Image (cartoon, helix red, strand yellow):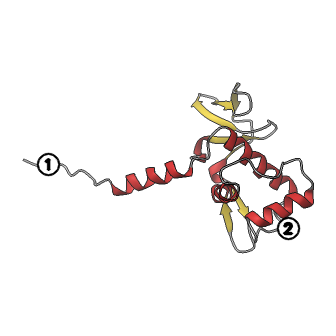
Amino acid sequence: MSLDKILAISGKPGLYKLIMQTRNGFIAESLLDNKRLSVTMNHNVSVLSEIAIYTLTEEVPLKTVLQTIATKENNEPSSVSHKDSKDKLEEYFFEVLPDYDEDRVYPSDIKKVIQWYNLLQKNDLLNFETESEEVEEEATEEPVADKKE
C-alpha cells in the first residue's frame, strides 16, 4: 500500500487519489464516488504517508496503525463504525494502539482513522505485501557499472 498518492482534503469528505499535477495545483479522484476534482493551493491537503498518531513515547506512522488494524480485522472492514460512541471507539483504538496519547489524539481523529481504513479497504488499497516485495526487489537489485573499453 502506498499512501504517497492518497490525500485528505480539508472540507471535503473521504479520501482522494492523486491523478496528475497541474499548473495551479492538481487533479484528485474521490475514493467515495470516483468524481474528479481540481484542487488548488488554497486547499488544506494532507498526504496520508505524512500523518502520524501520537503515542506516549513516539509518533507512529499512519501506515503502521492501518497495518495493525488490518491484522486485527484479518483484512476485513473494521468491527466498529466511525459512527459508534466515543467510548467504543477509544476502547477499539486501545486494542490497536495501546499506548496512544489520549490527550493529543481526539475521538474525531480516531473516527477519521477508522473511516479511512474502511475506505482504503473497500477500494483494495491496503495491499501491504505488494509494497514490501517492491522494497525488497529494489534492495536486491545490483547497480550496473559503466563498462570501459
Q: Quadrant of residue 73?
A: bottom right
Is 132 placed left or right of 58 in the picture? left
Structural distance between the alpha carbons of marks 2 and 1: 59 Å
Q: Which mark is residue 92?
A: none
Residue 89 horizontal side relative to residue 68, left or right? right
Quarter occupied by residue 45? top right
> Which amino acid type is marked by label 1?
Lys
Quarter location, residue 27: top right
Find residue 138 and report its horizontal and vertical position in percent: 38, 52
Q: Which mark is residue 147?
A: 1
Residue 32 in picture, x, y percent from top left? 74, 32
Judge left or right: residue 5 versus residue 46: left
Q: Residue at x 65, y 58 (%)?
A: 71
Q: Crowding near pointer 1: few (<14 within 10 Å), some, many (20+)?
A: few
Q: Secondary structure under badge 1? A: loop
Q: Secondary structure at mark 2?
A: loop
The first of marks 2 and 1 along the sequence is: 2
User: Disc 2 designates what residue?
Assistant: 103
**Amino acid found under the numbered disc labelled 2:** Asp
Contact check, label 2 and label 1, Cβ < 8 Å = no
